[in-house]
Amino acid sequence: MALRTVFTMSLAAAAALVIAAASVLAGTDNVAFPSNYKTAFTFYGTVDRADNKTVRDLYVNKAAFDAIKAGRPAPSGAVFTMEVYRAKLDAA
């Protein structure tokens, strides 16, 4: 079997496993996107992803922010929202 075919089959198998695992771990509840996140949530930070040329602004709800600030893990029900923008390259 050609190396390219083996690689393609391995990649397809890995993708199938990832999809199967995600469906097992996903909950049945639907989470609505919070339309008021810019005013109701706390701005958490900006991440500059030079590897994929994006900039990300992160927002968290109060419960998550309070837990993280106190050094605890984010609680169940924590909401994180991320805006992703394409970076302006060579911008003046």
Image (cartoon, rainbow, N blue to C red):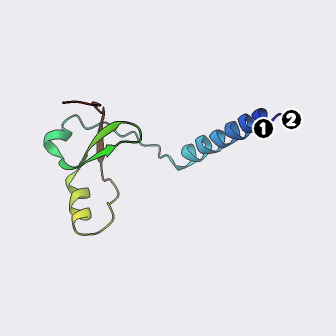
Could you classify mark 2 by the number of other residues whose Cα lies within 10 Å: few (under 14), some (14-19), or many (20 or more)? Answer: few
Q: Residue at x 15, y 44 (%)?
A: 40
Question: Relative to 66, is 11 on the left or the right?
Answer: right
Distance from Cα at disc 2 to Cα at disc 1:
7 Å
Residue farthest to the right?
Answer: 1
Instruction: Check whether the beta carbons of the residues at disc 2 and disc 1 lie within 8 A of each other.
Output: yes
As helix, strand or loop, the secondary structure at mark 1 comes to: helix
User: Which comes sooner in the sequence, label 2 or label 1?
Assistant: 2
Which numbered disc covers residue 1?
2
As helix, strand or loop, the secondary structure at mark 2 comes to: loop
Against 68, residue 3 (above or below) is above
Quick one: 28 or 57, which is closer to the camera?
Answer: 57
Against 69, residue 7 (above or below) is above
* Residue type pointed to by label 2: Met
Against 87, residue 26 (above or below) is below
Question: Relative to 78, is 29 on the left or the right?
Answer: right
